[in-house]
């Protein structure tokens, strides 16, 4: 399937991915192997949308792909660049951007399912799904940080207050996107199709199959 794309957006995503690779290389060369491996893993996560959609008939909007790279870059630089410790609200900004990214991914997938007829989109269901899925992802992230601290003796979590503020920022990011989703769903269906990055053009194989079925029915 051909995806609507913006070359500038794609190149900007490539640029962010390159910065993540540079951070990984710099950390490993500096002896910070755990940070380097985490940055390398983040880079591979930025490739996940391309791998997931390569053989599937949908694609995420280029803006969502860019946000995935940006949110991962913020977390990478928080560790490798020491921004989490140096900048007071950097951690909260990273959580806000990341939660908004997760929420947009959930919304895109729900719009896709609605276009395919797998589910019936209702505004309350979409809003609830966005909030629940995003908060669940935020909770899993906090569990990950807790596990890393326990295993490697790091200090990713700075106490209960820090963890709760992280979850609050996750909720704010999810609520912003949920409000946007409610606005979009109130518009024409064409708007949701554009947002989901869907092209209503059949694949050549589908066209041939449909023609063959028509011939058989005759």
Image (cartoon, rainbow, N blue to C red):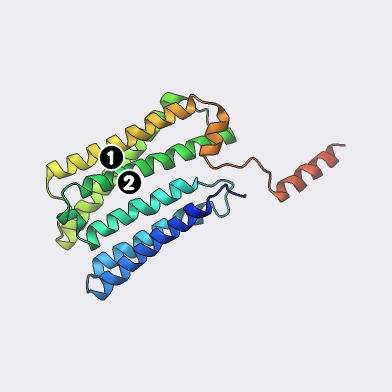
Q: Is 145 located above or below residue 128 in the figure?
A: below
Q: CA distance from mark 2 to mark 1?
A: 8 Å
Give the residue displayed 29% in from the left and 58% down from the top.
Answer: 76
Q: Is residue 28 visible?
A: yes
Q: Position of residue 45 (x, y in %)?
A: 39, 57
Secondary structure beneath label 1:
helix
Q: Quadrant of residue 19?
A: bottom left
Q: Position of residue 2 (x, y in %)?
A: 62, 50
Give the camera-side residue of 129 and 97.
Answer: 97
Q: Position of residue 203 (x, y in %)?
A: 68, 48
**How many C-alpha atoms fall within 10 Å of the one at disc 1: few (<14), some, or many (≥20)?**
many
Residue on which disc 1 sits: 170
Q: Are discs 2 and 1 less than 8 Å apart at CB? A: yes
Looking at this view, name the residue that lies furthest to the right.
218
Q: Position of residue 129 (x, y in %)?
A: 39, 33
Give the residue displayed 20% in from the left and 56% down from the top.
Answer: 83
Give the residue displayed 13% in from the left and 41% down from the top.
Answer: 161
Taking the image as shown, residue 117 lies to the left or right of residue 86, namely right
Secondary structure beneath label 2:
helix
Residue on which disc 2 sits: 98
Q: Is 4 located above or below residue 86 in the figure?
A: above
Location of the C terminus (image quadrant)? top right
Taking the image as shown, residue 209 lies to the left or right of residue 12, namely right
- Whichever of labels 2 and 1 marks the residue nearer the N terminus, that label is 2
Q: Quadrant of residue 214?
A: top right
């Amino acid at each position: 399937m051909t995806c609507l794309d913006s070359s500038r957006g794609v190149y900007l995503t490539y640029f962010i991915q390159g910065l993540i690779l540079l951070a990984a290389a710099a950390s490993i060369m500096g002896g910070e192997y755990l940070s380097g491996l985490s940055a390398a893993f983040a880079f591979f996560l930025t490739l996940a949308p391309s791998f997931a959609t390569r053989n599937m008939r949908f694609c995420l909007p280029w803006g969502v792909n860019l946000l995935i790279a940006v949110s991962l870059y913020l977390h990478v630089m928080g560790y490798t660049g020491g921004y989490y410790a140096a900048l007071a609200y950097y951690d909260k900004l990273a959580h806000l951007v990341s939660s908004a990214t997760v929420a947009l991914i959930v919304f895109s997938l729900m719009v896709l399912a609605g276009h395919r007829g797998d589910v019936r989109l209702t505004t309350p269901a979409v809003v609830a799904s966005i909030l629940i899925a995003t908060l669940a992802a935020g909770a899993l992230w906090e569990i990950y940080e807790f596990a890393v601290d326990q295993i490697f003796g790091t200090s990713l979590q700075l106490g209960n207050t820090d963890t709760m503020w992280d979850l609050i920022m996750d909720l704010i990011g999810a609520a912003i996107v949920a409000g946007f989703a409610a606005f979009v769903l109130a518009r024409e269906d064409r708007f949701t199709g554009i947002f989901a990055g869907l092209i209503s053009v059949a694949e050549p194989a589908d066209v041939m199959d449909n023609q063959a079925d028509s011939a058989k029915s005759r």
